[in-house]
């Protein structure tokens, strides 16, 4: 199958590209700033198009000229860059996705899988977030993603574009681009690479997290589900259970690397922001029921062990 992965040289997209190639797909990657170092091992097996999601013609040409049958739409500006320029975020995350949906409508109706975010729910949600919790996003990133979720649902009902969406929790793994305020990536990657890490939150800060391989698995799982199984269209998907605290992660890191250098210097502003986000249970019951979602990495120790194996085995992929 001809698969287009937008953001395909990013943290999750590059892993997905390797998986789709292994499954025999013809993979086209569309990225505004292709990180060719990250995909050096598969460069000769994929087609890389350097393009901007905000440029409709570049998106249309890519979908039309490559006979695309499925779009895994991961390309986006993440939270901090969206806050730095909400106007750029509107162009890329919102209008860029309009361009993907229009390309699907106009050129062969490829399936479109969209990766939304737990950030669409905003702060002060209470401790449990379900598929039907009201969304009150407080960031440009969250506002844009929430709008596009609904727009995709509209394209599904109005134009029969096979739009499906996974709403990911925070994603941790080697080489993450997002500088998460909760720091679940840094506290693993740096100490496991022999570098010290100073954490700006307190050990009790908890954030629903999933491993990056599970984020890719969720994209594939929803894509492969039979059309009639997809009722909710937009689904929460979580991973590690119970929701880990940063202290839980620290302990797991020290179980595999007892001399890991981890210190705490809590920044009151970051702690306040982290504690305003009170989600303890990110309920993904609909995904489990409708298309059999089940994360492969549910235990913190399994995540840290695989994180270490990835850094050891593929140091060049996660720079
Ligand atoms: N990482 C997380 O914690 C997390 C959580 C929830 C949802 N998501 C979503 O998953 C998707 C992938 O995230 P990631 O962590 O791999 O991010 P990433 O930043 O590593 O990858 C995103 C890719 O999109 C590309 N991109 C940015 N602007 C573009 C543009 N204008 N045109 C074309 N490409 C562009 C970037 O160059 C990058 O390669 C994103 O849509 C993100 O919102 C991520």
Image: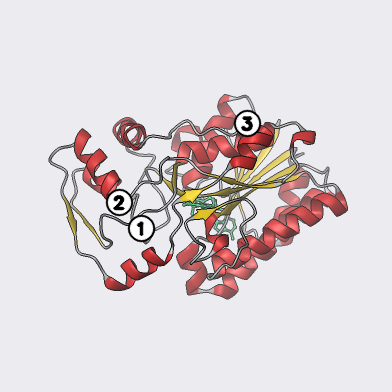
How many labels sit on residues?
3
Mark 1 touching mark 2, by CB under 8 A? yes
Report the residue marked by disc 2.
246
Q: What percent of the width, then of the height, locates residue 312?
A: 29, 32
Mark 3 touching mark 2, by CB under 8 A? no
> What label does residue 292 carry, if any?
3
Q: CA distance from mark 1 to mark 2?
A: 8 Å
Q: Is mark 3 within 8 Å of ligand 1?
A: no
Q: What percent of the width, then of the height, locates residue 204?
A: 29, 55
On screen, residue 80 above or below 154: below
Badge 2 element: helix
Q: Is mark 2 within 8 Å of ligand 1?
A: no
Q: Residues within 10 Å of mark 2 (few under 14, many from 20)?
A: many
Task: Report the side of 258 relative to 186 (left or right).
Answer: left
Quarter of the image that includes the N terminus: top right
Q: Residue at x 12, y 41 (%)?
A: 259
Task: Report the side of 174 relative to 268 (left or right).
Answer: right
Q: What percent of the width, then of the height, locates residue 280?
A: 44, 52
Q: Earlier in the sequence, mark 1 or mark 2?
A: 1
Task: Report the side of 227 relative to 237 (left or right).
Answer: right
> What label does residue 182 carry, if any?
1
């Amino acid at each position: 199958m001809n698969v287009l992965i937008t953001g395909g040289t990013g943290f999750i997209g590059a892993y997905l590209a390797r998986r789709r190639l292994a499954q025999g797909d013809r993979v086209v990657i569309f990225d505004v700033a292709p990180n060719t170092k990250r995909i050096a091992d598969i460069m000769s097996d994929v087609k890389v198009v350097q393009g901007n999601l905000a440029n409709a013609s570049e998106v249309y040409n890519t979908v039309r000229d490559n006979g695309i049958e499925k779009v895994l739409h991961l390309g986006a500006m993440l939270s901090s860059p969206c806050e730095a320029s909400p106007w750029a975020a509107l162009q890329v995350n919102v209008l860029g996705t309009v361009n993907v949906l229009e390309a699907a409508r106009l050129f062969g109706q490829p399936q479109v899988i969209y990766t939304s975010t737990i950030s669409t729910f905003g702060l002060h949600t209470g401790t449990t977030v379900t598929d039907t919790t009201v969304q009150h996003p407080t960031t440009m990133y969250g506002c844009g993603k929430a709008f596009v979720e609904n727009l995709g649902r509209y394209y599904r009902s109005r134009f029969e574009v096979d739009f499906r969406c996974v709403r990911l929790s925070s994603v941790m793994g080697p080489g993450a681009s997002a500088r998460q305020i909760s720091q679940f990536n840094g506290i693993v990657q740096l100490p496991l690479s022999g570098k010290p890490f100073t954490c700006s939150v307190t050990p009790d800060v908890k954030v629903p997290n999933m491993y990056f391989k599970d984020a890719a698995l969720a994209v594939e799982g929803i894509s492969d589900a039979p059309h009639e199984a997809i009722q909710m269209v937009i689904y929460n998907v979580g991973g590690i259970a119970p929701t880990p605290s940063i202290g839980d992660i620290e302990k797991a890191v020290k179980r595999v690397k007892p001399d890991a250098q981890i210190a705490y210097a809590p920044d009151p502003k970051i702690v306040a922001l982290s504690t305003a986000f009170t989600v303890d249970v990110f309920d993904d019951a609909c995904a489990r029921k409708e298309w059999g979602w089940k994360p492969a990495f549910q235990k913190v120790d399994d995540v840290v062990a695989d994180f270490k194996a990835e850094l050891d085995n593929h140091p060049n992929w996660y720079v």
